[in-house]
Amino acid sequence: MGPPDSSGAGSPERERPLLGGDVVGGAVDYNGRPARRSCSGGWRSAFFIIGVEVAERFAYYGIAANLITYLTGPLGESTAAAAENVNAWSGAASLLPLLGAFVADSYLGRYRTIIIASLVYILGLALLTLSAVLTSLGTSECQNTTKITSCSSSKLHVILFFFSLYMVAIGQAGHKPCVQAFGADQFDERDPVETKAKSSFFNWWYFGLCAGVSVTLVVLVYIQDNLNWSLGFGIPCIVMVVALVIFLMGTRTYRFSDRSNGTSPFIRIGRVYVAAAKNWRKKAPLLPIEEEALKLPLENYKQFMFLNKALIIADDSKENQTNVDDVEEAKSILRLVPIWLTNLVFAIVYAQISTFFTKQGATMDRTIFPGFEIPAASLQVFIGLAIVITIPIYDRIFVPVARSLTNKPSGITTLQRIGAGMFFSILGMVTAALVETKRLEIAREYGLVDIPNATIPMSVWWLVPQYVLFGLAEALTMVGLQEFFYDQVPSELRSIGLSLYLSVIGVGSILSSILISIIKAATSNDDWFSNNLNKAHLNYFYWLLAGMGAVGFVLFSCCAMAYIYRRRAA
């Protein structure tokens, strides 16, 4: 099974717009000439880029998935200190893409940013491997001495490790938002056939991403835990080198945005906000050009009408530097704010998957057959399995059926897709609360409340439904957010758009930590989050998150119904 129309150019001409022919507007090839549909872009280019993303996610999660184990093991940090360092690095890795996207959209362009970021990424991974080798040698020497205190890593090794770790975060900051935006750029939104293909691209992109992560969780974590960390960090470095080679191999097929003319989008949009602020109290006649605004749908014109004042001619000027299109772009940025804010609740709920769900599973009966227990963290594979199954069904069955009913290229709107995923996340959290309540009842029934390390006679398979529901939620909401933020920003700012999606997850994780801290401070003796889960009340926390998710879903639905989609380029 694979994406449809893999040739990228095999669609019937009768489905193409008559104007424009084989030339793709606003795009050039690697020689700077107008890009031709028949020999550039489409799936032929997207396959290279999806392959690069699979490799990058393999490398990233090869570090992130088991980082806390390395910090508490070879580096000798306490659990609390290691958790703080992991959270700090994860937060930086989620928020730095905003900076990387700004550099790409303002100065370097996506292609150059990807190459530079890949080189930084590879250097960071190489230094990380070196630090692991040096730490391993130091540990070996330490084991041959009688001084226990000499077994902690030297400050030099620790400094090198964290320098390398944050270099990886910086490389990922330029790589992550630009690769996906560059991949979606290979499909012309003015072409009806390629518009449908672009919607499928986001689905298959996430499919490949999950495949890469799944391999990481199975292969690299095993190598790191059972062989050695030098090899566990070295393999991602080699994979990233191969990914860069693959990306460069596709250069002749890529479409590049034509940046040869026009003012920076940041300057254009900034002028609108500044001019509107300066003209806040003015009632001077508007430019005749504002009459063009009336050609827009009336709802576009009436929304955020205060920005229309940017079209007022200043007293000391004979002409205006802004136009209707600039104002519409400025409005499109403001429209994203409510959607971004209401998705933070989903991100808070989503953050629990790798923490408390795993702790739940660790207390339950995980025996598969005598002598073998499934690791609690391995249950996350059911999320990936749900995604891998859901995305092909969604893309190949649901979308064509919905498209025939709605005449929308993606079947349903991206906001409808996001909302459906949020609903499944609420169901997942309700399921988690019910299962945890049942687990606590069994612990009390068997007198295990005061035995924190006791195995509760309850199968770990009870947790599978909540993992599957969160897999469905991720397949719908995460992919929907990516496509939404890509589509709804000006075309020159699409790397920024995808970094906004990443920032939702990053800020949501930070808010989750803050929420847990507030609850711990408000409840006595760690009632909700006791180290002894048989005395804790994670079910209360899950019910709280389910309630927050429901409120967030209602707020999101209101914002979604009021949302005005950005006009596509003509």
Image (cartoon, rainbow, N blue to C red):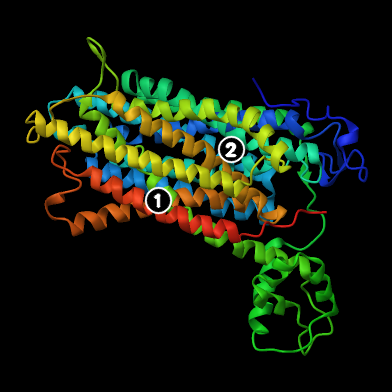
Q: Nearer the viewer, residue 364 or 67?
A: 364
Depth check: give the residue in front, 340 or 59.
340
> Disc number at residue 549?
1
- Element type at mark 2: helix
Q: Label 1's element?
A: helix
Q: How many marks?
A: 2
Q: Quadrant of the C terminus?
A: bottom right
Left or right relative to 561: residue 193: right
- Along the horizontal axis of the image, is 184 left or right of 154? right
Q: Position of residue 536 (x, y in %)?
A: 17, 43
Q: Residues within 10 Å of mark 2 (few under 14, many from 20)?
A: many
The correct choice, above or below, for 451 with respect to 105 in the image is above
Relative to residue 434, is residue 487 depicted above or below? below
State the image coordinates of residue 48 (x, y, percent, origin top left): 68, 29
The label number, if any, that marks residue 22 in the structure image = none
Residue at the image point whose x is 23% and y is 40% from the top = 79
The quarter of the displayed image where residue 330 is located: bottom right
Q: Are marks 2 and 1 in contact (CB under 8 Å)?
A: no
In this orientation, does residue 72 appear? no
Residue depicted at 30% across the width and 32% down the height: 69
Which residue is farthest top? 370
Depth order, front residue of 370/166: 370
Query: Which residue is drawn at the image coordinates 72% and 53% (left, top)?
Result: 491
Query: At 40% from the left edge and 51% from the top edge, which residue is drawn?
Result: 549
Q: Quadrant of residue 18?
A: top right
- The numbered dot on residue 118 is 2
Q: What amino acid type is highlighted by mark number 2?
A: Ser
| Image location (x, y in percent) of residue 45 | 73, 31
In this view of the protein, can residue 324 be seen by the observer? yes
What is the three-letter code of the residue carrying label 1?
Answer: Gly
Mark 1: few, some, or many residues within 10 Å (few <14, many ≥20)? many
